[in-house]
Image (tube, coloured by chain):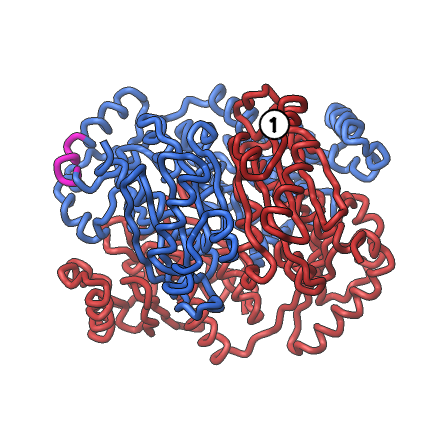
Chain colours: A red, B blue
Amino acid sequence: MKAVLITIGDEILSGNTVDTNSNYIAAQLKNIGIAVQQIFTISDDVETIKTALKSAFEIGTLVITTGGLGPTKDDKTKIAFAEFFEDELKLDEETFEHLRKLMIKRKREHLLEINQNQAVVLSKAQIFQNENGTAPCQMICKDGKIAICLPGVPYEVKPLIQNKIIPYLKEHFALQYIVSRIISVVDFPESLLSMRIENWELALPENISLSYLPIGNRVKLRLTGVGDDFQIIENQLDKEVEKLRPFIEEKVISWNGNEIQEILKEILTKKNLTISTAESCTGGEIARLITSVSGSSKYFQGGIVPYNYHQKIKILGVSAETISEKTVVSQEVAQEMTLGCQKLFGTDISVSTTGVSGPNSDEFNNEIGVVFYSIRVRDFEKTNRLFLPHLERNDFANFVSQRVLQDLVEILVKEIR
Amino acid sequence: MKAVLITIGDEILSGNTVDTNSNYIAAQLKNIGIAVQQIFTISDDVETIKTALKSAFEIGTLVITTGGLGPTKDDKTKIAFAEFFEDELKLDEETFEHLRKLMIKRKREHLLEINQNQAVVLSKAQIFQNENGTAPCQMICKDGKIAICLPGVPYEVKPLIQNKIIPYLKEHFALQYIVSRIISVVDFPESLLSMRIENWELALPENISLSYLPIGNRVKLRLTGVGDDFQIIENQLDKEVEKLRPFIEEKVISWNGNEIQEILKEILTKKNLTISTAESCTGGEIARLITSVSGSSKYFQGGIVPYNYHQKIKILGVSAETISEKTVVSQEVAQEMTLGCQKLFGTDISVSTTGVSGPNSDEFNNEIGVVFYSIRVRDFEKTNRLFLPHLERNDFANFVSQRVLQDLVEILVKEIR
């Protein structure tokens, strides 16, 4: 089954909001073998929505829209659906009752009347009630077309997709399986890598495709198989990975894992190691990445963001002399930070960052874009310097955080027994 | 001028990568008066790219693509452009020279040959060299259509857009201005708000539009004006904001600001206050939000992520008795955390979070979704409890972090003189 997603909302077209719903929905659909062919992001306008529905059904049989279901005047999705499917809108008693209960639960009964419009739905639609918001999810099937409209708020979308839409689609449609393996290769430029594995790639079976996703100095190789039998695809993928192994083995830090923090979890859990962080220029991003993984409290003891250099001295015990001699952005300070951090939190591993992310320099006039990071695993220590003047503030923090965790994983795979 | 963005890449359709380029490009174009009408996200396939180009030029005169320019086999953008514009691809000496210098700088001269394909460009294109990667940006103009293809890596896209494309478009095309004001309203449900300001909204001039963007318990009202004269739009917006003021004044925490961390910066700078953070269940997200703003080192002293409760006792001085009596997820612990944090970092303000983000409970068997947060401004203290069982781990951290900063701003606006 082929799907098209339609994201409705001027806030996305104007660059005010990043669309994260599509990403989530695409990943969930992929798990049950539905491939998203295209995503349209359009404005909140009845004619535009109808045109998009028409184009979308030329590409796929399943169309899922998000957004444009709020109670305010700028939300037009329902009207467009009614016109497109030649249906009418009517007040649904069951949905109204659901809405009433939600309002009572939220102590907002006085708002029921003005939210009543949220219980007005397509007369031929199947309704999936929304537990976390006032706009229900509606599904309409006609002439082999399936259209589903969802609200736009991400935390309303996720449970609707996960608990209602995915189970429904799984039950009602015979689907193909899509299975992936993501292999993480480091220190191997994409162009060189593609040359090295060219013959293997050209010999891949027709139902298996390869793509390259560079991130920092890591390249993720994603191998995707499609077919009717889950086990057959699994076996095919295993076989191809085995064929690939000798070409790239020494550069691989993970044979299956998407996010670096998930790969880290696997290794730390296996080796039974704990970790803490001391972040200056990354401002908490490394701690946030590590704790974004469920179960991280087993190995993550804590982190500190000693943003001001006085805090580096006071809390981490970095020497004031080192700072005045070498400045706060130096190899020596990065090393003293991991040492102090390891001690403060009592962990096997600690990582630290200190740098100037710009747009302004620091009080020591260090060059914008310079960063030192240190990784300490028990007595093993490695410091590195990066120079990233082209990255704006937030990309800088993301890039450095990814790189630190990636280097840590590489050390744990290659250096630590 | 109307624009359409085309995002090319299977990694986005499969849900592996969130598309942040479109958001950045749309915001930058808006600043110079170019409105993005639609965004297509499509797969890396020559025919699909050509079809998308055709559809896009039915909507706008400027089309910008990202992605699909890498050296590997899965990148097809250039070929599609050549076929669509009936142009041919040829090796460009200047681009090759640029590539050669880049490779030397990166100590990767041995890779020049296999990256040579990156210097093969459309014969009729204008080239904007890429300082941060191997794929150049190409622009082709034909029959009143303007198409620009960019690489897909965000930190290559941003400088190309900011330093080359935007100045070029500004210089060569007479553009309309698009100006916005974002007003942040708290504790005022969208439906009730829309009713309250309905008459004002209906009387808005034709060139001014309004949209509602709910985020946590804040609603951002975005007022957007379009026109040929910047100053006239500015005056119109000022006038409309003044008319709106009496209806919502008591619920407004900011009259112009998009992100809560930017609003916070303005207030902290004006009031000359410093801040620190103690985060458990938000895992560093609040520190990361605060430090994402340039100049935050002026008021942010530091943060701590005492993930394990022993660290709360050891570093923040939370009492072990309080933890054993009330458990670690309690009003009392949240309060002791801000007290300890304020002392540790010596700041005017401190905020803390402690909660259970799931999917598993903590060692005290607290209910999943419960969170307490405390906000301390000198001697003023406020604690709040939220219950968010429906949010998955990362949404939970985001939601709580937004809410904490939002409440803090509200307190600073209303309570602290």
How far across and how far down the image is residue B254, in percent? 27, 35
Query: Magenta region: which residues?
Result: B242-249
How far across and how far down the image is residue A306, in percent? 53, 37
- Where is A280 relative to B127, above or below? below
- Where is A272 relative to B252, above or below? below
- Where is A109 relative to A277, above or below? below
Viewer-proximal residue, A408 or A153?
A: A408
Q: Which residue is mark 1?
A: A320
Residue B219 visible to an observer of this rendering: yes
Compared across the picture, whether A231 is left or right of B202 comes to right
How far across and how far down the image is residue A291, in percent? 54, 55
Answer few, some or many: residues within 10 Å of disc 1's Cα (few below 14, many 20 plus, some between 14 and 19). some
Q: Tell me which secondary structure the magenta stretch mostly adopts.
A: helix
What element does badge 1 sit on? helix
Q: Residue at x 27, y 59 (%)?
A: A79
Q: Is residue B71 magenta?
A: no
How far across and how far down the image is residue A383, in percent? 73, 38
- Where is B338 relative to B61, above or below? below
